[in-house]
Amino acid sequence: MVNRYLACIAATAVVLTSFGNLATSVGAQTPKTPPVKPAKPTTPAKSAKPTTQTPPTTSKKAETAEQLLDRGNAYVRLGNLEGAIASFRAAVKKKPNLTAAHYNLGLALAQSGQVQDAVYSFQRATRLDPKFALAYSNLGAAMLQSGKTDEAITYLKRAVALDRNLAVGYYNLGLALRQKGDVNGAIAQLR
């Protein structure tokens, strides 16, 4: 089965910077499909509006949730977050229990600065898959960005408990503990 998660590890190192680029982050995992080749440039008429890149369309039939998820991932690769968010939302509407759609929606929302909506999407992903360490890590990072340090610490502790090798989880937990004034705890997490 193709892994449909945009596992954006770098996106969780959020406190001192901002969310990482979804399409190029360290550890990004997208479906293994050939890249979409852009059309040859043409000279638009003077009255034509500039176009944005869109992934190729499928037939006019209604797309499945999985196809919408793939479309959202393609939009992310093209740098079109608005298109990605719309596609992920449509996937969630069609199949509310599709964890990957909630998680990827959270990443796209966080990337676009909609942190509170991202929190909701990450929370939904963790409810659907309680062992999804990276979703907990991103949820903790979003909480930290929102100024909810205590909640961030709870989610980040859960992330590193689920995946002892999740370096970004330890990093963000260290940052959260430092923000709370627990310097020794922060140092322990950053070792």
Image (cartoon, rainbow, N blue to C red):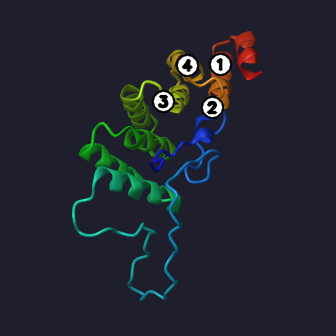
Q: Residue furthest left?
A: 61
Which of marks 3 and 1 precedes in the sequence?
3
Q: Are marks 1 and 4 in contact (CB under 8 Å)?
A: yes
Question: Considering the numbered disc 3 on the image, is that residue within a helix, a strand or a loop?
Answer: loop
Q: Are marks 2 and 1 in contact (CB under 8 Å)?
A: yes
Q: Residue at x 62, y 20 (%)?
A: 176
Mark 1 and mark 3: span between their CA atoms?
A: 25 Å
Seen in the image, is 83 located left or right of residue 166? left
Tag of residue 72: none
Seen in the image, is 130 located left or right of residue 133? left
**Whether residue 18 can be seen here:** no
Amino acid at dot 3: Phe
Residue at label 3? 132
Which of marks 4 and 1 precedes in the sequence?
4
Amino acid at dot 2: Val
Residue at label 2? 15
Residue at label 4? 149
Classed neighbour count for the residue bearing mark 1: other residues with Cα under 10 Å, few (<14), some (14–19), many (≥20): some
